[in-house]
Image (cartoon, rainbow, N blue to C red):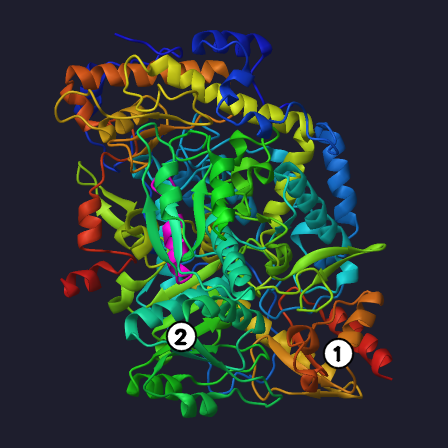
Amino acid sequence: MTMLKEGRPTAPQALNEADAVPATATGNRALMLEEALIFEIGSTETTGVDFAEAPKVASRLGNLARTDGIGLPGLSEQETVRHYTRLSRQNYAIDLGLFPLGSCTMKHNPRLNEKVARMPGFADLHPLAPQSTVQGALAVIHELAAWLVTLTGMHSVAMSPKAGAHGELCGLLAIRAALEARGDARSVILVPESAHGTNPATAAFCGYKVEDIPATPDGRVDLEALKARLGPDVAAVMITNPNTCGLFERDMKTISDAVHAAGAFVYCDGANFNAIVGRVRPGDLGVDAMHINLHKTFSTPHGGGGPGSGPVVLSEALAPFAPLPFVERQSDKFVLVEEETAEDHHGQTFGRMVAFHGQMGMFTRALTYILSHGADGLRQVASDAVLNANYILRSLDDVLDAPFGGSGPCMHEALFSDKGLAEGFTTLDIAKGLIDEGFHPMTMYFPLVVHGAMLVEPTETESKAALDQFILALRSLAERAKAGDEALKGAPYFAPRRRLDETLAARKPVLTWTEPELAEAAE
Amino acid sequence: MRYLPLTDTDRQDMLTVIGASSVDDLFVDVPAEARLPGKIAGLPDHASELAVERHMAALARKNLSAGEAPFFLGAGAYRHHVPASVDHLIQRGEFLTAYTPYQPEIAQGTLQVLFEFQTQVARLLGCDVANASMYDGSTACWEAIGMARRITKRGKAILSSGLHPHYVSVANTMAKFTGDALVHQAPTLDAAPDIDALIAGIDKDTSCVVVQYPDILGRIADLTPLADAAHAAGALLVAVVTEPVALGACRTPGHMGADIVVGEGQSIGVGLQFGGPYLGLFACKQKYVRQMPGRLCGETVDAAGKRGFVLTLSTREQHIRREKATSNICTNSGLCALAFSIHMTLLGEKGLRELAALNHALAVQAADRLARVPGVTLLNDSFFNEFTLILSKDAREVVRNLADKGVLGGVSLGRLFPDAPEIGNGLVVAVTETVTAEDIEAFAKALEEELA
């Protein structure tokens, strides 16, 4: 039987024993606790808060006072703490172990960032507070913006986009505004196959026609196909670099030059900036706009899927079109410019993207992270991220197919495929097997250009020991899948749930809880 | 570099396995002219935890936080007391440092929370279904307009003059590029919202009418006639709620006929945070669910027949439909949704009603006191916890001077509507349970001095 370093067995015969354990009356298995829904355990009469008695006044609610029940159950404080603590234990998280989601970048979340973001001087500020009372907060935005501009070698930055995909929108809106300003109506955005799925969605959302550009057999943009398609109808090319195959687009500068010569702009999806920060400046590659997922490159907890933050760095050509509001230094103070004014450098702004100024909570975290690393540390971030990914790629390319393993080093993520597994075994089986090995699975079936893709991104915050343990687990699973080990198809065995029926969920969507008797009556 | 665990020995061993002589070899695909040989100039090197904390704390001290002064700001962001257990629970690493629940077997914690959140939001807003949250209220509002366009196949949206002006700006920005026609009147200082004018504007090209409740001036009105008029013309009613605590005391838009109800959830559990991250709420009637943007969590069963939860209906989403997706959004405000859900669970219906009653009662007291200040008129006949005062001079200046006196006294209409100087004497004042009788008195006194 293979053993992991910690002594946990990895062989499938252990799995069947777990299945043979008798059921318990509660459904619990010792510390593996089942937890009902708040609607099943709470009541509308229960509360976990105490309020001062409301002063007696005559209501001014007009005729709109609420008379119906709302149906919101409450729990006491202790029940609440237990409910959410128990639920938390059913989650895998980066604090528990390696979370190698390619293209999503799960790295350690320093707790200093959390402490700083919660300082009342940042957390308890109203977005419309008088500017004289928020000078420190405006200084944070200004200082972070300066770092982002310097690290990317760009001209300026728009801070307000709320997430990566929102940043894409910002970049395309600036491009469209710039084109319109010169009276140039263009209708097409070119998106390589190796780009993130949000790119074509964003382009379509902005009213553009989207055309794919194929990838070469070595996983990069087909330069000749791209050049051939450029023309007066093309507004921009959206490139992800490093791309979703984990490769650096070698021809980026050539692409940019060709795109500019055709009168179009280059949008770069900067979701993977952590792979090159401190080593490459996108501005030197001819990029016109690039969003930076602050939560990825500069760490913010993902919180079960969000929120994120997506500032967009801009070239000089696009800077005048950046969104409002923005922070400016004026002699001895910082000013939040909220209105269109002719004299400021955003004179041709495309407008406002979001109610307030963006994700201040992420700005404080990102700045804290950046200051902690400094110029030297950030360069090391990219080096270690790339080193870790290549270590995984080379340690496993003898047992797993690495479709672009021959086309040079990978950047921050290692790409494998399900080619060569036994008949009927898939990427999904490997992923679910990893759960039993105590790891979060890698990204599955993405990028779309590779059949049965497995995209592994270890990040720079993983130790060699953690990587070795992961490699051992993935090697063992690859061997089992090649040998046709049927037990693998039942994985996971040791998770809070076995494989979930996603087809049922989509075919017959149940998106809210209904009282059982009402649900039954509706059947 | 305390967050980077590799030692130089590790690095050397790993390079040997890779077959590279140095890390620089791994960047061989970067064109030589774009490769930076050393550190980027002009930026400082790494700093200790203590040094960074000192720097950030010094910046934090340059701000006047809401808790340090009598505080009356609202206009789309509200200060409520958040029970200590909310922040404690969201900081559990298993919630805080989890990613999107792409592997449901080991993400049931997040998924069950999202399912509970969706149910809480749907019930609070009076709708059948809700999604797992969006960026914020303003972007949710825009997405609702887009959804109405997809459902009705019409491209004209009528926006109430009482809609938050920043929400209008966001919609305007997006409409420039999607071709939607937006109809929006400048706000006026009337005691009642513009329901009749909205009804009069509805025609056969109208996709939706967007109305805020309570609106930017704090006014509330029965939305039923508006819903009826919209439906009679084949249009939808989109209601926007920026202060969800109001729904603990007031009738819910969904129950007054709104087809889509969106909102800003910051009020419950999230905190002010200088504008973000916030929490977009999005709910609608069941029949429109497949046109709804954003992430959804649904109930299902696992291979052993146990109830479990998964992300579902992803065929609407960008990673599958690419350019045909209902939206380009690929995230939600998961952690803020968790905070909202925990706070709402602590409140329960009983607590929410008490909280809402307390907010309203204090607001009534404050409105009456402030209206007695010479030079002040109360605009609203009815309101929840926010109302508009008409001052005898420009409110922008008044707000700045009040801040110098240590009172954070509301949001001026001049700041919200820079293009409408005729309403520049309006001041929007919000009162929540965090406001004390002393705060109200301090505000009234400072205002008296300022207007004297």
The reply to the same-chain question for discs 2 and 1 is: yes
Count neighbours of disc 1 (C-alpha within 10 A) and say few if under 14, some if 14 to 19, many if 20 or more: many
B103 displayed left or right of A294 = left
Under mark 2, the amino acid is: Val
Quadrant hosting residue B94: top left
Q: Quarter of the image for the C terminus of chain B: give it.
A: bottom right
Kindly identify which chain the residue marked by label 1 belongs to.
Answer: B
Q: Residue sitting at 65 percent across and 43 percent down?
A: A149
The local secondary structure at tag 1 comes to helix
- What SS does tag 2 mark? strand
Residue highlighted by disc 1: B395
Q: Which residue is mark 2?
A: B238
- Left or right: where B102 falls relative to B28: left
Q: Say above or below: B157 vs B90.
A: below
> Along the line of sight, which residue is nearer the eye, A194 or A453?
A194
Extent of the magenta region: A192-207
Give the class, few, some or many, for how many residues have Cα within 10 Å of label 2's Cα (few <14, many ≥20).
many
- The quarter of the picture where residue A419 lies is top left
Tell whether position A201 is magenta.
yes
Whether residue A108 appears in this view of the structure is no
Which chain does tag 2 point to? Answer: B
Q: Where does the image place residue A118, in percent across and percent down from the top left?
A: 64, 46
**From the viewer's perspective, is A503 left or right of A252?**
left
Q: Is residue A191 visible?
A: yes
Residue A394 vertical position relative to residue B442 in the rendered view, above or below: above
Q: Position of residue A457 (x, y in %)?
A: 42, 28
Marker count (numbered)? 2
Q: Is residue B100 above or below residue B68?
A: above
Q: Residue at x 44, y 85 (%)?
A: B222
Quadrant that contains the N terminus of chain B: top right
Label 2 with label 1: CB-CB less than 8 Å: no
